[in-house]
Image: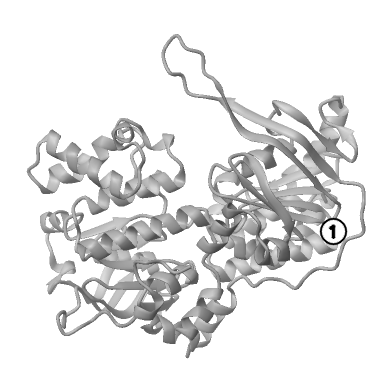
Amino acid sequence: MRPSSYPLAERTDMTTEKNPLPLLSVRELTVHGPHARPLLDAVSFDVPAGGVVALVGESGSGKTMAGRAVMGLLPPQVRQSGGSVLLQGRDVGTLSAQSLRALRGCDVGMVFQEPMVSLNPAMTIAEQLFEGLRLHEKVSTAQARERAIAMLRRVQIADPERCLAAYPHQFSGGMRQRIMLASVMLLKPRLLIADEPTTALDSLSQREVMEIMAELTRTEGTAVLLITHDLGLVARYAQSVVVLEKGRLVEAGAVRSVLTAPRQAYTRSLIEALPQRSAQRPARPVQAPLIEARDVHVSFPGARQGWLSKAAPKLAVRGVSLAIQPGEVVAVVGGSGSGKTTLGRAMTGLLPVAGGDVCFRGTSLGQADAAGRREFRLACQLVFQDPYSSLDPRQRVRDIVAEPLRHGPLLTRDALQATVDAMLAEVGLAGFGERYPHALSGGQRQRVAIARALVRKPAFVVADEPVSALDMTIQKQVLELLRRLQAERGFGCLFISHNLAVVSEIADRIIVMENGRIVEEGSVADIFDRPQQPYTRALLEAATTSDLLAELDAA
């Protein structure tokens, strides 16, 4: 399904005779930090007026640093040591602080990677939307409110008046990203820098946000510098692509030529790291379920309608039944708010069930005694979505991995150290035991989280979005690690993800959830080749996968 904003057949170099000069021209840009090696080394590229140019590369390649240099927002210890950034002919590096404040927001807007961090949690949405208007334009409160409501409607916020009075924590990730986009586009900037705008969003929210962004930029004539590691987004929305590796430009050109006929080995490695659907796995012999959810309901307190009213419970999981066999990987997919993570937490006993039951090896957890529940919890482990938040920043890697072992039979110091060292070696982190989490990359932190989950050799593992925030090459490494360890150790796995391409590579069976219910389930072939429900088909159509590269090649 092709987006209406930029059909594949129309993707060409956006520099035309009407716009001979680029809106943004980056020439030999060199940026240094406190270390000797430059963060950006003589990088050059152009963004034409009305065009969409993508910056791609692994974590640490310098993508975000290039975007910040355009805004004049380099960190305190980082400086531009060479080259120029020309925006409509003006050298951003030579502008005064006052001129830079006038440029930011009005001429250049930026949508940051994590909207929950970039939106002020102590301010209402109205205050945050009005702030830019009041800074750059002379508008009354009534005018600001009218323009904010109109823009919120354009980004498909259903109740914009109510949204203005709310706070960021009251919205989902996709809604917060729409609000962030609305706040930037209110000032109609000539250039929009979108830094990983859809990283943690499900495929439906991702598609909606990108379609809204494409439509807004098309109608307003805004150029886009798209910073992303998702080559599916690049193939679908960009006209030109710039590939960075460790601060250096290794390849650049039209999307079709770069992605279908890459000249450099690094570019080919990025494309080869795209998730590929695995071959059909052999049928499993029928076994007794390792863990089973039977008509499980999970509810949370709802919002009060008034001071004296009683909050009605909100059902997050509605009558879900699911069985996982030993050694089986069952993937749960669905949009944000579909109940995926809530189901996983309920099956591990981290959330109480309002109805139904969870059985582990045939024993009901609702009827188990304290010793039985403790034994169950020791046999279950979680790999969380954000390893940086789930790892204690004050502990060394060795202590983090050793922590689950302290809840079982006591080990001698030498035995404990040997077990931890063996586990770290198994996940490819031999010699990393003395480091702290902040000294690791995102992929290395996720490996630590996997090591901590598997060091006790659990029978059941819940992997909650374990690769959603990783770039393609690191994602491939983590998936291969999970698949290898699962094959060797034979644990059952509930794999929660919004990335259907990732699911197709690792899962034996797929469960599709919507509004707390299972709407469809089956093998990978059943779901991908023969989807029965409209919601499943919508998820598949919204997914950005390597199939887009074949579509580009044929266009």
Q: Is residue 127 shown to the viewer in this render?
A: yes
For the rendered model, the colour scheme is: one colour
Give the percent coordinates (x, y) of residue 131.
20, 41
Q: Secondary structure at mark 1?
A: helix
Q: Is residue 340 left or right of residue 282?
A: left
Q: Is residue 325 left or right of residue 142?
A: right
Going by the numbered disc 1, the residue's amino acid type is Arg
Which residue appears farthest toward the left when viewing the image? Answer: 138
Q: Is residue 302 left or right of residue 213?
A: right
Asked if 482 appears above or below 293 in the picture, the reply is below
Asked if 318 appears above or below 251 in the picture, the reply is above
Residue toward you, 451 or 500: 500
Residue at the image position 31 percent from the left and 68 percent from the top: 225
Residue toward you, 194 or 407: 194
Circle count:
1
Q: Is residue 269 left or right of residue 376?
A: left
Residue 339 sits in which quadrant? top right
Give the percent coordinates (x, y) of residue 525.
72, 66
Residue at the image position 59 percent from the left and 67 percent from the top: 474
| Quarter of the C terminus within the rendering | bottom left
For disc 1, the neighbor class at 10 Å (few under 14, some 14 to 19, many from 20) is few
Residue at the image position 83 percent from the left and 43 percent from the top: 291
Q: Is residue 398 shown to the viewer in this render?
A: no
Residue 62 sits in which quadrant? bottom left
Give the percent coordinates (x, y) of residue 82.
25, 76
Residue at the image position 32 percent from the left and 58 percent from the top: 75
Residue toward you, 121 or 202: 202
Which residue appears farthest toward the top when viewing the image? Answer: 308
Give the percent coordinates (x, y) of residue 353.
71, 29
Which residue is labeled 1 in the image?
A: 489
